[in-house]
Amino acid sequence: METLDRRAILAGGAAALMVPVGAGLAKLGAPLSGASGATGTASAAAALPTTDLGAYLRIDGANDVTLLIGATEMGQGIMTGLAQLIAEELMLDWTQVKVEHADAFAGQPNPFANPLFRAQLTGGSTSMRGWYTPLRKAAAVARELLLAAAETLTPGGGWSLAPGGKATNGVKTYRFSELVETAAGLPAPASPALATTRNVIGKPMARTDIPAKVDGSAVFGSDVQVPGMVFASVVHCPTLGGTVASLPSKPSGALAMVDLGNAVAVVANDTWSAMRMAESLASKIRWNLPADTSSRDSTSIMANARALATSTSAAPRIYETTGGVDPAIALADAAVRLDATYELPYLAHACMEVLNCTAVVTADSAEVWAPTQGQQLCIPTVMAITGLPATAIKVHTTFLGGGLGRKIEQDYVGQAVKVAKAIGKPVKLTWSRKQDFQNDMYRPCAVIRVQAGLDANRNLSAMIYRNVSPSINIQRNTKPGNNPEDTGAVAGAQGLPYAIANRRIEFVPLPADIPLGYWRSVGESYNTFAVESAIDELAGALGADPLAFRRAALAGDPRAVGVIDAVDALSGWSTSSPRSGRARGVAFLKGFGSYIAMVAEVSQSSGKMRLNTLYCAIDCGVAVNPDQIEAQIQGGVIHGLSAAMWGQVLFAGGKANVTNFNNYRLAKAGDVPDIKVSIVASEAAPGGVGETGVPCVAPAMANAYAKLTGQRLRKLPFYPGATMGGL
């Protein structure tokens, strides 16, 4: 048998990805960011003449239909889910369907902007929520135009769709490819009816992106190549907040050095050389360092947060007040009272694909290829650096090797553009893993105090909830003059469906200069830990079954009760006991337009917790692709498990303690529990899935561990300081 060399295969695959400078990706024969439907290979039909039908659809001579999406495919399967919507409306065979990322759109209105927030970016589990109805309507318009085209070519009426991208009147049949040019010139109908069938929506259709990712034809940011390109990497100031004072001599073999303000880029003939040279400069560059790093020191930051959590002079911002009685008075009268504080650390994104971007800048144009969640944000970034108008800028989205919120940011895109402009050559800029970890936009830390009480009838009578955490919007000053609270600060605590008669939800912004960003499941990732731990502690104080206690407190919300009942049945909570040496804990979340409940079954080995089985029930409205929903929950559980057990970034003197995965422990194959998922049937509007699998994991585990050992864990991670070789 012939021996295959992995490095040679990878090198050969990269050589096949060379694309012309200035070529629009949507027009290439094998689109960089596209996926090719069920076959997974670049179809020859892509080189055939194509005709656009509206902003989102393109039909080629082989009768294949390409969907252009504004959302970013980063492993969550949104290409497939959105393709199912148009396949349903147009009665397409799945093999006909292709999907590509749309380029960033510079004009207004932007047809590729998510209708929920009118921006072309991806985050917050909003892609299916935003596009479910608008994209179906767009496909329905296309359907009616194609039928009208058939009538134009062969009058007589009776035209309807037939499977496989066809229109027929029973006598004559046209393929869409024969109708699309005529259809494109007809007036669009105002409000066509949506399909009532469910032949594709609700079915576990094969993902459009997976075949290309298996055969190597899929292009991630790190795969992009353009003729004449050189390679760059960066070294940032080792102390957060520092800037370049002066540069040393250019390293031997380097093509150039570029001052980026808080970092220095080194340009070389290959990425590895650029990384090594950049790292070697860290001690040679003269840096301007902050005079005081206390606001960049975990010990100081957390001590301040604990003080603010109990301070009577902190002047919190109030985001919710319910009931006719001051919660403090209701707490004083409560039969059972809880006063507990929960702590959560800064977290890194730790995407598998490090930050990278390819840029070409000339005197009159700029072109960028980026694994980005924020295409629309890239355009003003490039404009500010180059001085070019938006019409002279192209931004192409590649596949992402993980996004998790980090790749909404613009720092790495701006760096690539600055370097390309400075040296006058196409540049691919790639961060090293160390630079990626030590210069992240971190998930905020939090100290959360929950005061809650139960009345004599065992009902939740009062809650005062105070979140003390850094604010992303205050740090960025993105909304001067407006309320600077970002949505994450109280998400997962505000608007709880629990029947709590009197409650007050407070937020105290924590002064800190650690760079902040949006992390998968944002505020719910820390607020749910506090809320669901507190609910469990109250149930324990009563001696009540924690699942039954939640069911009673959620009785006013049928969808909430639905997932509680579903996870009860799935886990056997009410009908069977866990195996000897194990215990179960439950947690619930209403968030991202969905409802979810989890039961964690844990054991203890060598004094440490182990998650054996995780049961999950989710009501995410219409389940467009059940397989993808299950996969996203599984991924979210593993992500949540890693954060709960080991995730933590500490800062001392303005420096992060994490440099690589060796000291940022993630779940390995042997750590992953058996994950069982039940999707609750629902006809509600689709909710989010990608974020929802994360927040309940930590509280469900903590609640199970409390039952198993009697020890209540109120601080994450459960096992700080772990390494990939430990535990």
Image (spheres, rainbow, N blue to C red):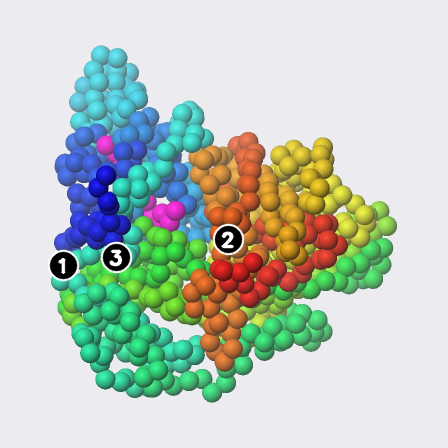
Which type of secondary structure does the marked residue at label 3 adopt? strand
Q: Quadrant of residue 187?
A: top left
Q: Residue at x 70, y 71 (%)?
A: 310
Please tell me whether residue 72 belongs to the stretch shown in magenta.
yes
Q: Residue at x 50, y 53 (%)?
A: 667
Q: Quadrant of residue 615?
A: top right
Which type of secondary structure does the marked residue at label 1 adopt? loop
Residue 599 in view: yes
Q: Earlier in the sequence, mark 3 or mark 1?
A: 1
Please tell me whether residue 661 belongs to the stretch shown in magenta.
no
Q: Position of residue 110 (x, y in %)?
A: 32, 51
Which type of secondary structure does the marked residue at label 2 adopt? loop
Pointer 2 with pointer 3, Cβ within 8 A = no
Pointer 1 with pointer 2, Cβ within 8 A = no
Closer to viewer: mark 1 or mark 2: 2
Q: Quadrant of the C terminus?
A: bottom right
Image height check: is 137 above or below 357? Answer: above
For the magenta stretch, what is the residue range? 64-75
Q: Name the kind of residue labelled 1 in the image.
A: Pro
Identify residue for label 2: 667
Residue 588 in view: no
Identify residue for label 3: 369
Q: Name the kind of residue labelled 3 in the image.
A: Trp
Identify residue for label 1: 227
Closer to viewer: mark 2 or mark 3: 2
Q: Pick whichever, 507 or 228, lies toward us.
A: 228
Q: Name the kind of residue labelled 2 in the image.
A: Ala
Q: Position of residue 630 (x, y in %)?
A: 49, 39
Q: Position of residue 715 (x, y in %)?
A: 64, 62
Query: How many marks on residues?
Result: 3
Residue 334 lies left or right of residue 388; in this view the side is right
